[in-house]
Amino acid sequence: MASTQPNPGSLAGCKVIDLSRVLGGPYCTQILADHGADVLKIEPPGGDETRGWGPPFLGDTASYFIGVNRNKEGMTLDLSQEAGQELLRRLLADADVLVENFKPGTLEKWGLGYETLSREFPALIHCRVSGFGSDGPLGGLPGYDACAQAMCGLMSVNGDAEGEATRVGLPVVDMVTGLNAAVAILLALNERGRSGLGQFLDITLYDCALSLLHPHAPNYFYSGKVPARSGNAHPNIAPYETLPTASGPIFLAVGNNRQFAQLAQTLGAPALAEDPRYAANADRLRNRQALRDDLSALLAGHDAAGLADRLLRSGVPAAAVLTVDQALAHPHTRHRGMVLEQGDYRGVGSPIKLSRTPATLRKLPPALGPATRDD
């Protein structure tokens, strides 16, 4: 992702009105904005609450807000007032997409629900990100990432076997919901090219959290066994976990017998691949603890980073466990353009790489104010 503007982007000309706050919706609209969409972020008079989710801050804006709101213009609007509702309608007159994450029923109360807006703007694509959707046993209730992780089974399979259920250490449900919302918008834009009509996109944290249960859900469907926590170990593959070395942990992700034989060769113990306890993946799973003990003894004299590099270059998936600062400073991170820097701004670049119309950094996150554009 370049720090200049060499091209208008693959979504140039697509106008997005972003009423969303916090993470799922803003992450979605940042994806669209990175690729050229004209995104107008409309905040309530008090601003998106994540502006205050710090420290750290840049000026008076929290890093949390900065991380998901680049390439957008901004304005504040009180949608509870008739004047704000009328201005939103004027903005929607030539918009392609509306993204919002109001609690179901809120926009409807203001006369801005999908049924009303679709009559006024039949080509408008209306994407709602919510916790549970508007109907069903939990319909209309507020949703939060950590709660979705808890109630959709993610926490139950995350953590050490002897420990307690553990939240994934990043807001994975919010972010995958934002990704799914972006995919849904692109699908609807493509379909609109044939029908000329918009549609309502109903994207929930609940559904997206359940969609992440691979391979645990299929394992349960076909074995009847309730998945349990296994730390960093994979439920279906061995060795596929962190193991200790002289300089820190290394993650081995050995997916087939050829890779296991190469691992044994690199560790100077080719006979390990001939051991009947480890002949095939099913054998290695049955004898996981013995395998872990044997590998730990072989790894004790190695440096994690150096060994991981040798293994990876020989075709064995492996990685030293890096901290956030180490990952961001890795030479390949910079080579891939995954850290953006412009003035005081620093951010993680777009992972979506297009050859002719790559993502670009065109605008820094908007300041909080009445408007940063003319309409």
Image: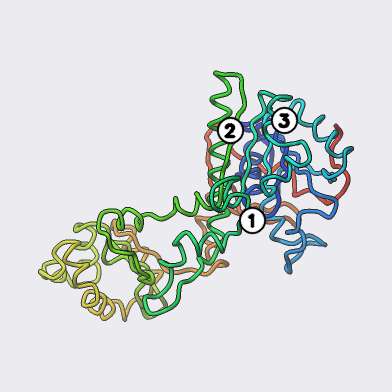
Quarter of the image with the N terminus in it: top right
Residue that appears at 60% across and 34% down: 200
In this view, the residue in front, 371 or 340, is 371
| Residue 285: x %, y % from top left | 22, 67
| Disc 1 secondary structure class | loop
**Looking at the image, is 211 positioned above or below residue 195?**
below
Q: Could you tell whether 223 is left or right of 354 in the image?
A: left
Q: Earlier in the sequence, mark 2 or mark 1?
A: 1
C-alpha gap between disc 2 and disc 1: 37 Å
Residue, disc 1? 142
Q: Earlier in the sequence, mark 1 or mark 3?
A: 3
Q: Residues within 10 Å of mark 3 (few under 14, many from 20)?
A: few
Residue, disc 3? 116
The mark lying in front, picked from 2 and 1, is 1
Q: Label 2 sits on what residue type?
A: Thr
| Disc 2 secondary structure class | loop
Q: Label 1 sits on what residue type?
A: Pro
Residue 357's label in the rendered image is 2
